Image (cartoon, rainbow, N blue to C red):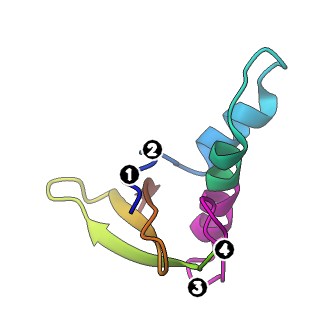
Amino acid sequence: MPGWCCAWAIQSIWIGQAFEKSDNATMISETSKAWIQAGKLLAENPAAQVRCPEKGDGFLTVHDEAISGQPTRFERYLVCDVCGARNVMLMPA
């Protein structure tokens, strides 16, 4: 079972925009690109059915958790229902 892939903080889809605007010298893996795309979709619609960016073998489930002491943000956990691949986004409340 894969561990945490990466922990990207996505506030208003910031990280996706940063990669889209970066020059060609910035190289990221196809898996990382797939996680960014999944994050964009699930930031806008947490009920969307999004395939696992790791293997495509399942769908990502979404679970939101409040952050103690930070009322303006929460964490959105994305977990594959088949392989267990996971990621976390930092979201504005």
In the image, what residue type sits under mark 3?
Answer: Ala
Residue 2 percent across, percent down from the top left:
41, 57
Residue shown at 73%/20% (left/top)? 26
- Among numbered discs 3 and 1, the one appearing first in the sequence: 1
CA neighbours of label 4 inside 10 A, class few (<14), some (14 to 19), many (20+): some
Q: Are marks 1 and 2 in contact (CB under 8 Å)?
A: yes
Residue shown at 28%/70% (left/top)? 65
Image quarter of the C terminus = bottom left
The residue carrying mark 1 is: 4
Q: CA distance from mark 4 to mark 1?
A: 17 Å
Residue 57 percent across, percent down from the top left:
62, 75
Q: Report the span colored magenta.
A: 37-56
- Among numbered discs 2 and 4, the one appearing first in the sequence: 2
The answer to which of 61 and 31 lies nearer the viewer is 31
Label 4 SS: loop
84 vs 71: above or below: below
Q: Is residue 14 magenta?
A: no
In the image, what residue type sits under mark 2?
Answer: Cys
The answer to which of 56 and 26 lies nearer the viewer is 56
CA neighbours of label 3 inside 10 A, class few (<14), some (14 to 19), many (20+): few
